[in-house]
Amino acid sequence: MPRFKQVKGLTDLNTLRAYVETLGVEIPIDGEIDPSGALAEPMTIADGYAGRKVAANRFTVLPMEGWDGLADGRPSELVKRRWRRFGTSGAGLVWGEATAVRHDGKANPNQLVLNETTVDDIAELRTLLDPSQVTVLQLTHSGRYARPTTAGPQPRTLYEHPLLDDRDEIDSSTLLSDDEIDELVECFVAAAVLAEQAGFDFVDIKACHGYLGHEFLSAQDRPGKYGGDLEGRSNFLSSVIAGIRGAAPHIGVAVRLSLFDFVPHVAGEGGIGRPATAAGCGPDGPGPDGYRYAFGGDGTGLGYDLTETHELLDHLAGLGVGLVCASAGSPYYVSHVQRPAYFPASDGYQPPEDPLVGVARLIAATAEVARRHPNIRIVGAGLSYLQQWLPNVGQAMVAGGCAGSVGLGRIMLSYPHMPADVLAGRPLDRRLLCRTFSDCTTAPRNGLVSGCYPLDDFYKQREERVLLAAAKRRSRARLR
Ligand SMILES: Cc1cc2nc3c(=O)[nH]c(=O)nc-3n(C[C@H](O)[C@H](O)[C@H](O)COP(=O)(O)O)c2cc1C
Ligand code: SF4
């Protein structure tokens, strides 16, 4: 017996609205799509230093890496194919994928790296997009999820985390010193200088999904200048941004931010996700503080309170940041919060809630920050699960001030020209709608290149498909 209704089966607006109501959540949904309406409006992004950029419409291609670069950090033909497809998507803004500022910060051996050796190849990626598209390049160090070579993980952390350290088999030897962080700040600044040279309009200082830039924000147990109170926890971001303003004044600065986080989840009975707990830490733990390690969390590990998120966004606005891409949680430990899906990835768990509840949570938090910070353009995310209803919800979000732009992640892998179809008033090609099978996550979790294996003919024909099918069988057995 299926636990939740699939969106595919919610075939008309009334059925969708009635089902959303039974879930006890709110999702803004427009009845008709107006191809020349809210989604077609240009979006001005004002950076306090680099000036204004205008995206032609309200669609953004979200950052989507493919675990498919060359070992030296340059793009492969697979990376170029992805960027070419994003270039013809019709989206006004393209947020380029995670690019490490140095080799030890790569999340996988095939992540892009931006340095003096690779800059010309990364510049070529920009040329594969449409010249009219506004572009962002995401700069990152993967912190506890660093896996720069095939030899295995090489995590670097900021504080001892009572749940994640056990799970990731990490001890205190992975802690970064303040001096090492100072060096890393310089690496981010140097990479931003190169991104400017490569022709990007913005760099994103990645602060989401459990990677290093995100871990700083929950480092209240870290002594010294990069932890403690919110000023200390945001000092890394502040220092990087100040450095970029001095060294590369013509590139805008953006931030991808997990607006809130949840306690890590694990597969429980029947493979269904449940909170991981440890003494003194977790919603059921005996500690008086509940779960303290979720930036933007409400203290229980299972809800959000954006008080600190607003403070951080006010601070970023003061540093001239005019563009933020919203996200939440992490795909490693709370995938249902970060990318709602019907079918879990092989390292995940069955959704503990209807994925539409996760979508509604992301929309509500994004709307709260968009309304509170009108000087920052906020890009929404986590909407692919809406499938055929994505344009109806996206239009309602933009028209209602819930987001400046509609971010498109997984659906861009299966159906990259979806924005062009919507803006031209063409009916959606339903065969290409992402059904959240999660193969694009399962493949890299098993050492294979990412891609939409079920729906993109190019990946359907690749030999990795056989290995992927075997990995999925093993995962199904584990979650049974
Ligand atoms: C295959 C894959 C690669 C991703 N790569 C990145 C990335 O490089 N940087 C990032 O911030 N998020 C990355 N994400 C997260 C997406 O940008 C997005 O937040 C997520 O997929 C939810 O949006 P959606 O529902 O439209 O897919 C990735 C997601 C997937 C599935
Ligand atoms: S593999 Fe394709 S259908 Fe499945 S989640 Fe990824 S993009 Fe969507």
Image (cartoon, rainbow, N blue to C red):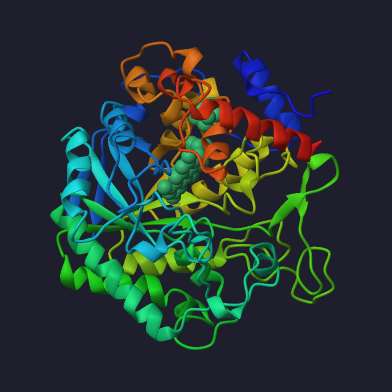
* Residue 388 shows up from this direction: yes
Image position of 81 with respect to 112: above or below: above
Q: Position of residue 262 (x, y in %)?
A: 65, 57
Q: For the point 44% across and 14% down, which residue is it?
A: 428
In this rendering, would 128 be left or right of 240?
A: left
Q: Which quarter of the figure has residue 231?
A: bottom left
Between 224 and 365, the one lying in front of the other is 224
Image position of 325 with respect to 426: above or below: below
Q: Position of residue 244 (x, y in %)?
A: 23, 68
Q: For the point 27% across and 26% down, which residue is it?
A: 88
In this rendering, would 387 be left or right of 91?
A: right
Q: Which quarter of the figure has residue 380?
A: top left
In this rendering, would 313 be left or right of 473?
A: left
Q: Position of residue 452 (x, y in %)?
A: 48, 28
* Residue 402 shows up from this direction: no
Between 378 and 95, the one lying in front of the other is 95
What is the total number of numbered labels drawn onto the structure image? 0
Q: For the point 64% across and 51% down, which residue is it?
A: 334
Q: Residue furthest bottom?
A: 224
Between 100 and 375, the one lying in front of the other is 100
The C terminus is located in which quarter?
Answer: top right
The N terminus is located in which quarter?
Answer: top right
Image position of 462 with respect to 151: above or below: above
Image position of 452 with respect to 211: above or below: above
Q: Position of residue 99 (x, y in %)?
A: 34, 54
Q: Which quarter of the figure has residue 353?
A: top right
Q: For the point 79% across and 77% down, which residue is it?
A: 288
